[in-house]
Amino acid sequence: MNISYTKQGDYLLPNLIVKNKKQYIIGKYGLLRLEYIKKYKLGLYFDLLVNNTLNEYLHDIDTTIMEKVQKLIKELSEKDNINEELKQNNQLLWVSKMNNIKNIAEEIILKEYIYV
């Protein structure tokens, strides 16, 4: 690799070019992963940062986990027979059960994909 330099006063500064990459908006799960790798996976964090792939990596994690959580919520609600009929007949019970299922699904997915 050949790096050129420009003299600025007494200093030689490298002529580095950062490629323009698409910047993604990072959601809840991407931010949780970012916090985790900053604290426990510093090597991975700096590797992603230096290679300018951190934003894309966090976006991929975020979208993957959102899809998995939604899929797991659907599976668990079907397994527990939480359906539109229950929603029409007893909305408070339906909301309570769906919130419980969402919390269970998030806990499972976070342990498998965020905190590893």
Image (cartoon, helix red, strand yellow):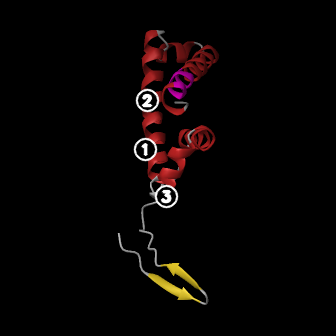
Q: Which mark is residue 93?
A: none
Q: Which residues are magenta?
A: 105-111
For label 3, the SS is: helix
Image location (x, y in percent) of residue 28: 58, 41
**Disc 3 target residue:** 50
Under mark 2, the amino acid is Lys
The residue that label 1 is drawn on is 60
**Image mark for residue 68:** 2
Q: Nearer the viewer, residue 60 or 105?
A: 60
The residue depicted at 51 percent of the width and 55 percent of the height is 49
Which label lies toward us, 2 or 3? 3
Residue 44's spot in the image, x, y percent?
Answer: 50, 45
Nearer mark to the viewer, of 2 and 1:
1
Q: Are marks 2 and 1 in contact (CB under 8 Å)?
A: no
Precedes in sequence: disc 2 or disc 3: 3
Q: Residue at x 60, y 22 (%)?
A: 99
| Pointer 1 or 3: first along the chain | 3
Q: Is residue 110 magenta?
A: yes
Magenta span includes 3: no
**Quadrant, the N terminus:** bottom left
